[in-house]
Amino acid sequence: PLQAVIFDLDGVIADTAVVHRAAWERLAREIGAPFDEDIAARMKGVDRRGSLDILLERAPRAYGEQEKCELEARKNGYYVERIESFGPDQLLPGARDAVESVRAAGLRIGLASASRNAPLLLERLGIAPLFDYIVDAARIERSKPDPEIFLAAAAGLGVPPEACLGVEDAAAGVDSIHAAGMVAIGMGRREDLGEADIVLPGLIALRIADFVDNKNGATA
Ligand code: BG6
Ligand code: MG
């Protein structure tokens, strides 16, 4: 039976996937690296270093470790500058209701975001108290599509992975959910989320009752 729902943050709950993308695109321009839809799609959901490595694949020169740290800090500066002024208006449509409906259904709620800015963002959005467990992204060693982050969320919630639903907007995230042994709900367009078990346009379309079997508790 279903016991918990584990959400991604950027592009699922908050309108920040575009902010990450814009910050990487600005950095790419500054260092003369190409940036296109394919690169943007591959970076989605991937952690900071993983994203930078994708960006640098076609950069005009190689970068050393210290330079990579400088580039990451520069991109993060662009990102944080934007989200500092964020508030509940930057919640995606239906996000707050969706999370509250999961709680009302008696399920536990986890957050599996690769972003080290997740705690700051949740606070700005005013929804931090709705979560039972938030994975500390800094303690995750292997980026999505590895299952580590969704498994850490399930462990933190004290729920077996097979009793969890994962919600993601990125292909790497859907693969991470599946590798963790969970059912994956994709947010966005089917062509971007081919492996997802169910695709919805956004959280506004999520009806948690569809996943909960009233007689036996809940089923995924
Ligand atoms: C993910 C985003 O949630 O977090 C990625 O989808 C981002 O775009 C990643 O690169 C890491 O974020 P941060 O805030 O730790 O640089
Ligand atoms: Mg995302």
Image: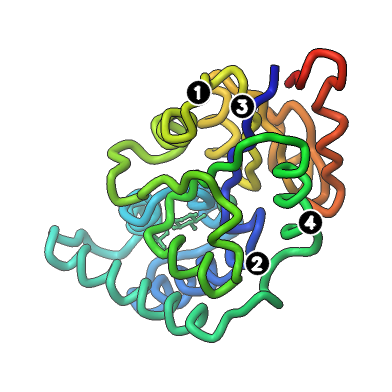
What is the distance, in whole Å, between disc 4 and disc 2 at their CAs?
A: 16 Å
What is the distance, in whole Å, between disc 4 and disc 3 at their CAs?
A: 19 Å
* Nearer to us: label 4 or label 2: 4
Asked if labels 2 and 4 touch by Cβ distance under 8 angstroms, the answer is no
Which of disc 2 and disc 3 is earlier in sequence?
2
Question: Which amino acid, mark 3?
Answer: Cys
Q: Secondary structure at mark 1?
A: loop
* Nearer to us: label 3 or label 2: 3
What is the distance, in whole Å, between disc 3 and disc 2 at their CAs?
A: 24 Å
Q: For residue 74, which quarter of the picture?
A: bottom left
Which of disc 2 and disc 1 is earlier in sequence?
2
2 w.r.t. 12: above or below: above
Where residue 79 appears, x then y in whole percent?
45, 75
How packed is label 4: few (under 14 Cα within 10 Å), some, or many (20 or more)? few
Question: Where is mark 1, residue-wise?
Answer: 180
On the rendering, which quadrant does ligand 1 occupy? bottom left
Which of disc 1 and disc 4 is earlier in sequence?
4
Question: Where is mark 2, residue-wise?
Answer: 15
174 w.r.t. 70: above or below: above
The residue depicted at 60 percent of the width and 42 percent of the height is 109
Where residue 162 appears, x then y in whole percent?
59, 17
In this image, 101 relative to 149: left or right? right
Question: Where is mark 4, residue-wise?
Answer: 97
167 w.r.t. 147: above or below: below
